Amino acid sequence: MRRIAQRDSFPGLPEYLWDTGFVYCLSVCDWRSPLPGENWVHVAESIAAALQARIVRGYAISGFPSGEREEKGRRAQGAWNRIRDRVPTILGGHQDCNILEVASDFKFRVGEKPDDFYFFLSHGTYHPAAKWRCGLAVGPNLVRSLEQLLEAVRQPLFSNFDRLPWAAAFRFPSAAGASQYLNGMAFVGAEIRSFGPAPNLLATHESRLSRLNQRTSTRYAISDGYLPEVYEFNSLSERHLCAPFRSGTLRDYVQQIGVFRPSTMGHKGSYDWWLSEQELPRVREELEKSGLVLSSEQEPLPLRSN
């Protein structure tokens, strides 16, 4: 596995975590689509096949996973070959929450093996907001670049979405728990604890996740033009490009740095924005106080839907 150069970084995480290796990740927000729940199994298995990955375990729920209501919903979890046929009958039973999660192993952290695979689709109501999320994390034996990852999932995943309000692809240090990060949580694993007290090491990381989760669960939707973070690959909509930045718009800025072009994922009104390892730190710093990055300390700007 390639040793990550010192210049690689991720907001809020210590740079030395990259020494433990990394995984390739994809995140999609507000992917609202007519894709019925019973077809989610086909999507998950098609993505695994495109990446030559194996699904070993699965989890599905339709209902109220928090347990705050008397009815906790229908669910199935365990070995994929045991629960697979039950999943289509579960998903879609409730509008409050639907989740499908599959992985190549029963272990808790993606990245322990170079051929690890993890994928989830979810939608639910986080009062008063609704969230539609999708996440994918794969080991470096399954793909060799972010470009290869996006090409592999373009047909089995993106072709199912009517529109693509926002998506991102990025590398993430294995020790920090990619599957947890994609689900909006911080992961305190043995590798991190070996460097010192986890609360101290991950305080900034957890604060960024907390702000992002709180803001997207209340008033601010990614599809309105906000950014969760700035990543190596960013799929932006017209709403993002029309957001105010400095004396102009975000479009004015992204056209001047990185590679900006119409979406290669096949969605009209969406655009690809690629940033190199050298460009990424500068862009993150310049956008941090723009009011557009929901994980930052800066109070968000009021955009069109707010």
Image (tube, grey):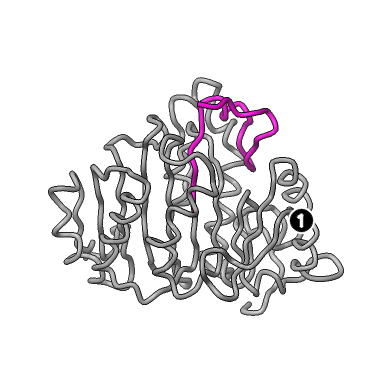
Give the percent coordinates (x, y) of residue 201.
59, 31
Give the percent coordinates (x, y) of residue 68.
31, 61
Observer-nearest residue: 36 or 267? 267
Name the residue at the right extreme: 247
**Drawn side of residue 15 relative to residue 30, left or right:** right
The vertical placement of 278 against 28, above or below, is above
Q: Which residue: 66% across, 69% down?
A: 240
First to last magenta residue range: 1-26
Density class for disc 1 (Cα within 10 Å; few <14, some 14-19, many ≥20) is: some
Quarter occupied by residue 292: bottom right
**Where's the C terminus, which quadrant?**
bottom right
Q: Which residue: 72% across, 57% down?
A: 298
Observer-nearest residue: 287 or 162? 162
Amino acid carrying label 1: it is: Lys
Whether residue 18 is in magenta: the answer is: yes
Whether residue 75 is in magenta: the answer is: no
The vertical placement of 195 against 56, above or below, is above
Give the percent coordinates (x, y) of residue 96.
33, 70
Give the percent coordinates (x, y) of residue 189.
44, 30
**Drawn side of residue 69 relative to residue 274, left or right:** left
The vertical placement of 61 against 140, above or below, is below
Give the residue at mark 1.
289
Q: Which residue: 33% across, 44% down?
A: 52
Q: How many marks?
A: 1
User: Secondary structure beneath disc 1?
Assistant: loop
Quarter occupied by residue 93: bottom left
Observer-nearest residue: 245 or 276? 276
